Amino acid sequence: MKLVIVGMGYVGIPVAALFAAVPGFKVTGLQRRSPRSSWKIDALNRGESPIGGDEPGLTQLIKKVVDKGSFKVTDDISVYREADAVLIEEVRRAGLYRDIWQCFAVLPAIRSVGVM
């Protein structure tokens, strides 16, 4: 199963690592290259966790799945073409309306997959 997970943040990274640990799964994380977050691509491809805080076992799992070749991260959207499934992990809470989910980042991700 070739899986693409869009958004390498607090949800996307653990989900990607867990799926990549399943035998037969090849997971590609898709992360936009921006001044704020492009460093995650390189860190994850080195097997390092960019998530701070207490995530028990995540750092070791990322290293394991990167070393076995079942997880990689890129900014190349052409990876959609060979995917069996795509998960979009791009929902954010922001702005004055913190109780309302701000889904503006999801729209470009959906458009890039070709759904909209």
Image (spheres, grey):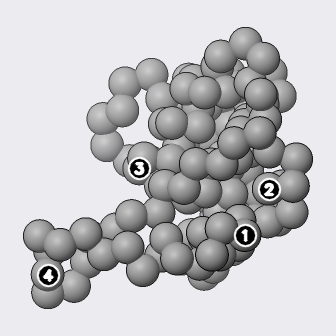
Q: Nearer the viewer, residue 41 or 101?
A: 101
Q: Secondary structure at mark 4?
A: loop
Q: Is residue 30 left or right of residue 16?
A: right
2 vs 4, front mark: 2
Measured from the top left, where is residue 92 in percent x and y? 34, 68
2 vs 3, front mark: 2
The Cα–Cα distance between marks 3 and 1, rounded to whole angstroms, is 25 Å
Dividing the picture into quarters, in which one does residue 99 lie?
bottom left
Residue 10 tag number: 3
The Cα–Cα distance between marks 2 and 4, rounded to whole angstroms, is 33 Å
Residue extending farthest front: 116
The Cα–Cα distance between marks 4 and 1, rounded to whole angstroms, is 29 Å
Q: Secondary structure at mark 3?
A: loop
The three-letter amino acid code for the residue at tag 3 is Tyr
Q: Classify the position of the N terminus by image quarter.
A: top right
The three-letter amino acid code for the residue at tag 4 is Tyr
Q: Which residue is mark 1?
A: 114
Q: Is residue 107 left or right of residue 80?
A: left
Q: Earlier in the sequence, mark 2 or mark 3?
A: 3
Q: Earlier in the sequence, mark 4 or mark 1?
A: 4
Residue sitting at x 42%, y 80%: 104
4 vs 1, front mark: 1
Q: Earlier in the sequence, mark 4 or mark 3?
A: 3
Q: Is residue 44 left or right of residue 81?
A: left
Disc 2, disc 1: CB below 8 Å? yes
Quick one: label 3, few (<14), some, or many (20+) residues within 10 Å?
A: some
Q: Which residue is mark 4?
A: 97
Residue sitting at x 60%, y 69%: 110
Quick one: label 1, few (<14), some, or many (20+) residues within 10 Å?
A: few
